[in-house]
Amino acid sequence: MTADRTSEPVRFTFEGRSVEALPGQTLGGALHADGVRILTRSFKYRRPRGYTCGYGACGNCPLTVDGLPGVNACERTVEGGEVVRRERGWPSAGVDVFRLADAAAPLLTAGFQFRLFTKTPWLAHRAEKVMAWVAGAGRRPSAEAAAATRATSHETRTVDVTVVGGGLSGLAAALGAAAEGASVLLVHRGVLGGRSLGRSGSAAGRHRTYGSDREAALALAADVAAHPSIEVLDGTAVATFDGVDLIVVSRRRRIQVSAPAMVVATGSYDVPLSFAGNDKPGVMLASAVRKLMHVERVRPGRRAVVVTENATGYEIADELLAAGVTVSAVVDPDPSARPADLVAALDAAKVPVLAGRPVRVRGLRGARSVVVAGGSGTRRLRADLVVVSRPERPAEELRWQRHYVEAGDTHAPKGAPTAHATDRTVVVGSAAGLPAQTLDDARDAGRRAARAAGAAPRRVDA
Amino acid sequence: MSAPGVRAGDPGASYDVVVIGAGVQGLSTAYELAKRGVKRIAVLDRSWPGGGASGRNGELIRSIFSSPEWVGLFDLSLRRWHDLSAELEMNVLFSPSGYLVLASTDDQWANCERDHAYHLSEGVDSELLSQADVLKLVPALNRDVVRGGVLQPSGGFAHHDAVNWAYLKAGARRGVEVYCDVTVTGLTTSAGRVTGVRTSRGPIAAGLVLNAAGGHALDVNAWAGITLPMVTSRLEMLVTEPLAPFLRQGLAALALLGYCHQTARGEFVGGTEMHHVDESRSQNSTWDLLADMATKWVTLFPQLSGARLLRHWAGTVTQAADLAPVIGSVPDVDGYLMSCGWVYGFMGAPGASTLLAEEIVTGVPSPILEPFSPRRLVEGRLIAESSLVVPTGEEHP
Amino acid sequence: MSARADRRTIVCPCHDVTLHDLKVCWDRGYTHPETLKRATALFMGPCQGKLCAPALDEFLESVGAAPGPDDSPARPTVRPPLYSVRLGELADPDGETA
């Protein structure tokens, strides 16, 4: 699916009222724009949770859509007409009586169930039934929703190269493999281009002809979509298995793929930070903030504090200012380690850069303020948005699965992600720990995969 | 250390009993021995306690089987289950919510009727349920696959990690020494007697060695020069996200070769088998089984079509042709016992460990354990048990 | 950080596991990634470790138990599915198998 913005706003029903969504917005983005910051209540303590990671990795935004629970709000593009409810919370996720469990938290610490009622089995049994009822929180797919998820066909594909992940590196690798004469299957969850669509800058030297990662992603996505040798599947790569190179689910099709070579372009995960109150709505990871601003066109908050351990946080602070968000401060354990020009730019914009760490985010239903500790003591800063920007970590799972298949058993590979790349399993981009990998290098990786698959290079005029 | 009760440091040079495998059989038998006054017991594991089938299984518990041998052993075990948490001083989350054996065809229904009559004759709690009865009990079932069933009200399920940890801690309190990250690499023998084990941390002398090595049990037997008609096989399971309660009981579906339950957190956990035995030692998950499980569970519980799959894993067991456990000694190999071949090991452990420990300490053979002796495999006295949901490798009804 | 702050620090949003829980279970003796996972429920929710894995890494670092470059990473086995999918999407389509 490519980012097509030519259509009109659409509407969906949210807990009985009508909400508007701009074309291309997700349910999470539209609700955020509508002022709905609490998207769910957590499993055990019924703590409020909101838009956190933006890319379906954190589990903090499940909604029930048309009777189907567990739909990640941040990933589900609004088409119009959906009936949407939040899960967990009585009488609603907005005001949840079961939040009292949070107050009982000291009694409910991990493993509490193994220490309670050891001598009174009948009481244990009763308690278990109550727990099951509370935990289940009435979440059950309706009969219609369940039937509508059922796969309607099983298909097979035989290609030279599969590319798992259609972010910038995956797109480049797919084009590289196709240029080498390979037939290519590209699998991608969401809009082609991935996180790059949220990046208005780019790492120096990453690409030559485009002004930004976003521009590059849109261009390559168009090239991929138009390429006769590349099939794009909008769906999820399920796993790689012994004897089965890849299983994909895409639009109610179950697809079994045979391909001698695979490019792992699964990207990376944002890394959260541990501090008190770090799970509250309004505490958002870097990619999520950029996605809200640049892809969903939603102002992520009114007043932000950016907590950062890398240059990205400073760029985001700049972007927030441009989006009309007040930035109370950038908090960095080591500002001297960042490029001087980034720090200077914020100085010029009168945004304080504090050397320190967040200690606690306060606010009952979402972030209201953050307490920061540093050399000069602690201070409390008002903020309804706390951005956490830390070096991302590779999404290594698929590479490990390939290794299990090669090894014949579930022993984890040791060492860095690239250490185990073979030519039949090529890892590119941030999945390889190379978030700034040049497009040329990603293309070359695609070519290597194509050659490993035995593809014959095309003639020059192809 | 890896779990509470596991010892730091290296094992000693000699013990009265060395148990190979810190799974549920090894840990429970060690506990039962210590409880009966055996002093120096070591349990050795190559990995973390309960890391094999004991931490991967379906957690179901029943005694409504069709043969006197199985009913004898597993009913004793079920009775132990009811008191286990109190005795081990840890809540193992034993849930006596009932165990339902589901018949989908007339043949399976006829077996259920026959088995039910047998249960009553043995004083085992059992109810025969018509299709309407079953659907009343579990409305979420697809009526097209329900012909009827047998319910054991006192059966159910427990939490496998809690059980392993509880036996581990209770044993450790009584002096059992559990060592992890110790790989047994061989046995030491002398004149037809096993005298100890060789390990990655050096040799250990033992008055008695117990092979409770689960998926690795056949390797250990081989070191003792013992070859039995057994294979190692792989079983697979899956778990979904938590859902509102829709299944209270443990359930075994004969037609699906499947077993499942819903945890107290609401997660649906279930495993199925295909008609052939997967004789693999790998713990990789396979596509064949994922497709099989997804298809069968969605057929049995249509709402599960909309449930998110969180995880699909595999584990290995060893099994004999009759799928019954292999417990006891073989002639001409002294100082060595086995408790392996367990496919229904989780539910059987409390009973088997009690009887085996008693046998070891008193020297009096248990009539309940005798049918499960390794000698049956050599002498061709296989146990005929028809109420299982694991394939034997032959055509299933 | 105080125990109170640790109780308010969520390391696993899926199952509401706090930093305090992690420390307590570690101190109790659950010191293998697989046993720690099962004692706390870390890695067992819808994210299957996507969000919580770094918190585990940092915790192990803080208690001096981070795996070395030659050790296996401190993770449970990586299992299917890579992202949660509905069981219905994996089932044989009605009346059809490839």
Image (cartoon, coloured by chain):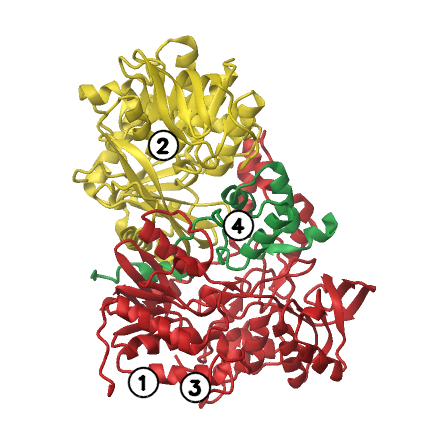
Per the model, the C-alpha gap separating discs 1 and 3 is 15 Å
Tell if the residue under mark 1 belongs to the same chain as the one under mark 2: no
Name the foreground residue: B126 vs B85: B85
Marks 1 and 3 in Cβ contact (< 8 Å): no
Using the image, determine if residue B394 lies above or below residue B12: below
Helix, strand or loop for disc 2: helix
Nearer the observer, disc 3 or disc 2? 2
Identity of the residue drawn at 65% across and 80% down: A320
- Quadrant in which residue A247 is drawn: bottom left
Nearer the observer, disc 4 or disc 2? 2
Q: Is residue A77 left or right of residue A353?
A: left
Using the image, determine if residue A111 lies above or below residue A25: above
Helix, strand or loop for disc 1: helix
Q: Chain of mark 1?
A: A
Per the model, the C-alpha gap separating discs 1 and 2 is 54 Å
Per the model, the C-alpha gap separating discs 1 and 4 is 51 Å
Tell if the residue under mark 3 belongs to the same chain as the one under mark 2: no
Nearer the observer, disc 3 or disc 4? 3
Kind of residue at disc 1: Ala
Marks 3 and 4 in Cβ contact (< 8 Å): no
Residue matched to label 2: B214
Can I make out residue A296 in this image? Answer: no
Using the image, determine if residue B29 lies above or below residue A372: above
Residue matched to label 4: A133
Nearer the observer, disc 1 or disc 3? 1
Marks 3 and 2 in Cβ contact (< 8 Å): no
